[in-house]
Amino acid sequence: MEFCEKLRELRKIRGLTQEELAEILYVSRTAVSKWESGRGYPSIDSLKEISNYFSVTIDDLLSAEKLIFIAEKENQTNIDNICQMLFGFTDLFSVIFIVFPLYPKNIDNYIFSVNLFEYTETSEFNLTVYWIMFILLILTGIFKLLLTHFRIGKLQKSLTACSVIINILAVIILALAGETYPVTVAFLLLLAKGFLFIRQTKSGF
């Protein structure tokens, strides 16, 4: 007997609806419906709750192969979430471009380092482009962290692509403008994103 059939049978023996079982297990009714229709499996924690509530062992609910599959999938999901969080924090680090003294300013023939608020040694067009790029990266990081926190995966790939594209453009534009320190920081952030992307790919995502 498959897990979906076992769960459905156990629920009916207790005289519970899917919604009532969902409340007991602290999951959504949709999750219970998904499990009972064979379209998915519970997490390890949910399996423990099911096992305790119905007084059955996890081995009675699932075969060893299925249990290993769920554990591996959960591990991959956890790794993916960590990478997504780190990706978001990497984009948030773009605030460095705004508040850190990375830009040169000539005062009485002395070169001082200033932040973007005080930077006047480039054209208004360049400044506008810088502000747009850095703000977009920060916003991308914020949205990525929010989506990861609430486990919303639909827009993650699009946000990752946008983040990488903006970062590449930042490297190119800052390099062409001769912004030595900002382009170095932008390149390092791009390398960090590349590492995270490779790590996710190796995890099967």
Image: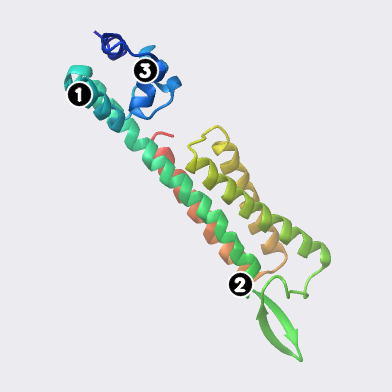
Tell us which disc is closer to us: 1 or 2.
1
The residue type indicated by label 1 comes to: Ile
Q: How many marks?
A: 3
The correct choice, above or below, for 32 with respect to 73 in the image is: above
Distance between mark 1 and mark 3 Cα atoms: 15 Å
Dot 3 or dot 2, earlier in sequence? 3
Q: Nearer the viewer, residue 68 or 27?
A: 27
The residue type indicated by label 3 comes to: Trp
Residue 62 appears in the picture as rendered:
no
Residue that appears at 38% across and 23% down: 22
Q: Relative to 47, is 166 on the left or the right?
A: right
Relative image position of residue 90 (x, y in whole percent): 52, 55
- Please give the residue where the numbered disc 1 appears in the rendered image: 58
10 Å neighbourhood of mark 3: few (<14), some, or many (≥20)?
Answer: some
Q: Residue furthest bottom?
A: 108
Q: Quadrant of residue 26?
A: top left
Tell us which disc is closer to us: 3 or 2.
3
Task: Give the secondary structure at mark 3.
Answer: helix
The residue type indicated by label 2 comes to: Phe
The correct choice, above or below, for 119 with respect to 157 in the image is: below
- Please give the residue where the numbered disc 2 appears in the rendered image: 100
Task: Give the secondary structure at mark 1.
Answer: helix
- Please give the residue where the numbered disc 3 appears in the rendered image: 35
